[in-house]
């Protein structure tokens, strides 16, 4: 019994202490947070992601495993060419084509900053050479050339380099008899290149017509957002035109249209579901089902 009493006393911090002194052992002696700012341990950046739609927070690894789709509300996060190629190509194995083409400031354009300086800053920030990356790989064993836009490079804007990569991609597909696909994610023409940018609409449309004449399939996937010159040209010229769920697709944005016509727009206006209902899209494909859907299309084209 004596040993038990000593043990209880030691829990209170000293032998022979009263019940009050035992309870004081659990009380905070000093109020407030005493850790200095320099000693605080912050959570490392890049571990968490918040959904822009439902505000659900999950780890980056969980988001990656879910194909960059929100586990709670199914919102499709904006992703770049690296992520799309990882989703589409077998074992993420592909050959990048035309990687050495880079934009130049032929017009010496200046807005808030010179165009050539803006390009240098974007190169350093993104690590990519322009707003489009072209790759050749296999989808469930079927060859496919994919030209994918990167929105983080000046809003995925359509410039002379993008037009040239699409044109060369078409030539490559004509030479090797391989289906062609463009993943659209763009705000439209690149204003810093002026008429050089607008010329790409006719240039790419002409090249895609050569694919059509050669009976080589062209697939267009419209993701959020697909606007401006891309919609006015190659985005709507596919043998198969599909979209991701909830993607905003159009020429002018809904705010511009509303201010122009002075009327409220229908609910869901310019979303992929709205366009599917009105016949502008052939189908909507969930990102988790994208690879399987493409493989089935490629098999169908071969038959």
Image (cartoon, rainbow, N blue to C red):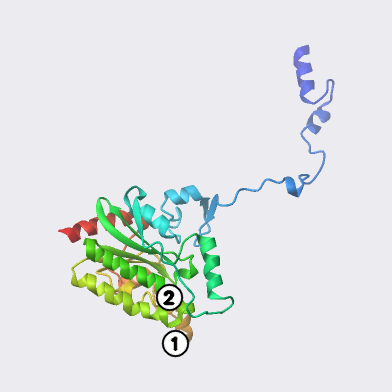
Q: Quadrant of the N terminus?
A: top right
Q: Position of residue 51 (x, y in %)?
A: 50, 58
Q: Nearer the viewer, residue 287 or 141?
A: 141
Q: Nearer the viewer, residue 188 or 134?
A: 134
Q: Position of residue 89 (x, y in %)?
A: 33, 53
Q: Position of residue 3 (x, y in %)?
A: 76, 13
For the residues bearing labels 1 and 2, Cβ distance under 8 angstroms: no
In front: label 1 or label 2: 2
Q: Position of residue 96 (x, y in %)?
A: 36, 57
Q: Is 32 above or below relative to 88? A: above
- Residue name at image x 55 percent, y 79 percent: 110
N-term mark: 1 or 2: 2
Residue highlighted by disc 1: 261
Q: Residues within 10 Å of mark 1 (few under 14, many from 20)?
A: few
- Residue name at image x 51 percent, y 64 percent: 123
Q: Nearer the viewer, residue 152 or 276?
A: 152
Q: Locate residue 213 relative to residue 280 in the image: left or right.
A: left
Q: Nearer the viewer, residue 231 or 34?
A: 231
- Residue name at image x 58 percent, y 75 percent: 113
Residue 301: which quarter of the image? bottom left
The answer, for residue 232, to whether it is visible in the render is no
Q: Is 72 above or below relative to 265? A: above
Q: Element type at marker 1?
A: helix
- Most extreme residue toward the bottom is 261
Q: Element type at marker 2?
A: loop
- Most extreme residue toward the left is 303
Q: Locate residue 284 relative to residue 196 in the image: left or right.
A: left
Residue highlighted by disc 2: 188
Residue 78: which quarter of the image? bottom left
Q: Locate residue 42 relative to residue 187 in the image: left or right.
A: right
Q: Residues within 10 Å of mark 2 (few under 14, many from 20)?
A: many
The CA distance from mark 1 to mark 2 is 22 Å
């Amino acid at each position: 019994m004596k040993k038990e009493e000593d043990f209880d006393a030691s829990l209170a911090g000293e032998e022979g202490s009263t019940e009050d002194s035992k309870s004081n052992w659990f009380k905070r002696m000093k109020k407030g947070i005493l850790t200095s700012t320099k000693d605080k341990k912050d959570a490392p950046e890049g571990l968490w992601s918040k959904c822009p739609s439902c505000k659900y927070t999950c780890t980056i690894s969980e988001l990656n495993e879910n194909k960059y789709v929100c586990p709670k509300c199914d919102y499709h996060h904006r992703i770049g060419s690296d992520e799309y190629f990882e989703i589409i190509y077998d074992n993420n194995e592909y050959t990048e084509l035309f990687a050495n083409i880079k934009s130049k400031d032929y017009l010496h354009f200046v807005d808030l900053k010179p165009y050539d300086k803006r390009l240098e800053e974007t190169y350093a920030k993104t690590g990519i050479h322009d707003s489009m990356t072209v790759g050749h790989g296999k989808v469930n064993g079927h060859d496919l050339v994919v030209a994918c836009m990167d929105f983080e490079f000046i809003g995925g804007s359509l410039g002379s380099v993008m037009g040239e990569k699409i044109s060369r991609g078409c030539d490559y597909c004509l030479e090797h008899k391989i289906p062609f696909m463009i993943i659209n994610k763009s705000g439209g023409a690149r204003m810093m290149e002026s008429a050089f940018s607008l010329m790409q609409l006719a240039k790419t449309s002409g090249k895609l017509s050569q694919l059509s004449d050669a009976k080589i399939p062209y697939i267009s996937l419209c993701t959020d957002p697909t606007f401006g010159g891309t919609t006015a040209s190659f985005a709507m010229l596919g043998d198969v035109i599909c979209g991701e769920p909830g993607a905003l697709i159009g020429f002018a944005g809904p705010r511009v249209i509303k201010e122009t016509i002075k009327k409220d727009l229908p609910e869901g206006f310019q979303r992929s579901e709205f366009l599917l209902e009105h016949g502008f899209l052939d189908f909507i494909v969930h990102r988790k089902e994208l690879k399987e859907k493409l493989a089935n299309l490629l098999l169908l084209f071969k038959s």
